[in-house]
């Protein structure tokens, strides 16, 4: 599998949840690159996949869309 920069991942999987392995971080522990294992607009699908793999690998989840403003309420079903 290929390691891809976060900027390329954000362009390729716009407004999706992305599960990464083999990720690299910067000085602030923000991911800067990684290998895409799964991606979906449905957050639940990514968390289910994470639970399947969590004991086998070091994993990271990112969201490639806009984060709501600080005073906005968000509800996930």
Image: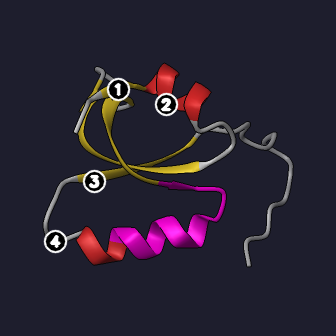
List the residue tagged with mark 3.
59
Q: Is 46 inside the magenta-drawn segment?
A: yes
Height in image: 57 above or below 52?
above
At label 2, counting other C-alpha atoms closer than 10 Å, the crowd grade (few under 14, some 14-19, many 20 or more) is: many
> Mark 3 Cα within 10 Å, few/some/many (few <14, many 20+)?
some
Instruction: Measure how far apart labels 1 and 4 are at the Cα level.
Output: 23 Å
**Residue located beneath label 2 in the image:** 9
Q: Is residue 36 left or right of residue 40?
A: left
* Element marked by disc 4: loop
Q: Say which of marks 2 and 3 sits in front.
A: 2
Tell me the number on the disc at residue 4: 1
User: Marks 4 and 2, Cα distance to the nearest angstrom?
Assistant: 24 Å
Residue contact at pointers 1 and 2, CB within 8 angstroms:
yes
- Could you tell me which residue is drawn at 59 percent across and 64 percent down? 43
Residue 40 place in picture, x, y as percent: 58, 57
Give me the C-alpha separation between circle 2 and circle 3: 15 Å
Q: What residue is disc 4 on?
A: 55
Residue extending farthest front: 1
Q: Nearer the viewer, residue 30 or 37?
A: 37
Q: What stretch of residues is rendered in magenta?
A: 39-50
Secondary structure state at the residue bearing disc 2: helix
- Which residue is at a point 64% across and 65% down the rendered structure image? 42
Instruction: Report how far apart the C-alphas of labels 1 and 2 lie in the structure.
Output: 7 Å
- Using residue 58 as the reference point, say whether residue 59 is left or right of it: right
Q: Earlier in the sequence, mark 1 or mark 2?
A: 1
Instruction: Give percent across and percent down for residue 51.
Output: 34, 76
């Amino acid at each position: 599998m290929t390691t891809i920069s976060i900027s390329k991942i954000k362009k390729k999987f716009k407004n999706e949840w992305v599960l990464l392995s083999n990720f690299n971080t910067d000085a602030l522990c923000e991911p800067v690159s990684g290998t895409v294992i799964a991606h979906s607009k449905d957050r639940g699908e990514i968390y289910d996949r994470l639970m399947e793999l969590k004991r086998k690998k070091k994993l990271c989840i990112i969201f490639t869309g806009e984060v709501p403003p600080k005073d906005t309420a968000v509800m996930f079903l």
